[in-house]
Image (cartoon, rainbow, N blue to C red):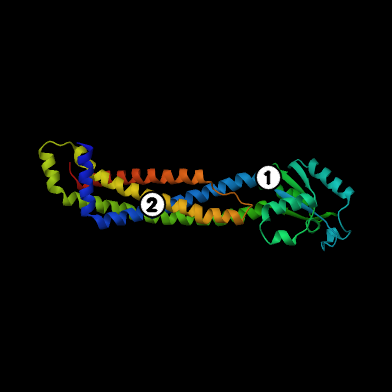
Amino acid sequence: MRPTLILGEAATGLRRNLTMTVAAVLVVSIALGLLGVAMLIRQTINKNKDYWYDRVEVSLFLCSDGDAEPSCSGGAVTDAQKEQIQTDLKNLPQVEAVFYESKEQAYELFLEDFADTDLADNITPDQLPEAFRVKLVNPEQDYVIVASAFEGRPGVQSVADQRKLFEDIFSILNVFRVGSLVIAGIALAATVLLIVVVIRVAAFSRRRETSIMRLVGASNLSIQLPFLAEGAFAGLVGGLLAMVYLLAGKALFIDVLADKVKFFEYVSWSETLVTSGALVAVGVVVSIVISYLTLLKYLRV
């Protein structure tokens, strides 16, 4: 069967069922768009876990003048206390590496994260504490051991497991990801039903042409191809719309957020394009499969 004839038959079917075709395209785009959002959120979580978990796991903030904690009653941490704390940290088998961070280094890092905010104008190096940044062998289990060994120790203001802050953020992102997947699943179910209806109506409206083609000896594939092309069209256009949604979200939301919140890793344009391209492919393949399975039931060839 000539491609032009297949496309002509598919175009005729789409015109006959224009309203349902448009509805199918829109629902496909919504389902794929939500699936793309879930995929991008998952990539964002993985990028930030790799970025942050490979860095500092625990911070020991050292005493400064004026700290009210009982362990800081003697004033700012002394050089001897710092040296002893560092030595004791390195001797712990649970500790993989120890990094000292001065007030000036803490201030430089602070400026990197908050350079364009009002906070940068109101903070000075003296207001930030010295700290030991500690990387643990097993962050999931070793934090309690390190914390119990140094919390309340003279010269140590507090021990913070910075992993917990990011776990809270990741938990929130996971809620959005799961919510997107749930809604995408519901929309996908609606997509399946709509494509089934579109193909079923198309098969019924062209039953005479189908009978004639069967009588003149047309192959099963020749009879099925126009219907499969209709399903592929709905999946292709729906996937392209989903791509537009994701690219617009990247430009209007993610990039704007990235300019304001510096300490977070965001998906890149290349990752967004790859995800969007995958959605187009998924839309076409799924639509063709649904159309084919529908034809097996409603088009006896």
Mark 2 is surrounded, within 10 Å at the Cα level, by few (under 14), some (14 to 19) or many (20 or more) other residues, namely many
Left or right: where 168 falls relative to 68: left
Q: Give 171 or 22, whichever is nearer the viewer.
A: 22
Q: Residue at x 68, y 43 (%)?
A: 138
Which one is in front in this view, the residue at disc 2 or the one at disc 1?
A: 2
Left or right: where 93 falls relative to 84: left
Q: Type of residue at label 2?
A: Leu
Q: Residue at x 38, y 43 (%)?
A: 281
Q: Is residue 76 above or below residue 6?
A: below
Q: Type of residue at label 1?
A: Arg
The secondary element bearing badge 1 is classed as loop
The secondary element bearing badge 2 is classed as helix
Look at mark 1 in the image and give the residue it sits on: 55
Asked which quadrant contains residue 116, the reply is: bottom right
Q: Mark 2 or mark 1: which comes first in sequence?
A: 1
Look at mark 2 in the image and give the residue it sits on: 241
Left or right: where 27 falls relative to 47: left
Q: Is residue 2 above or below residue 77?
A: above
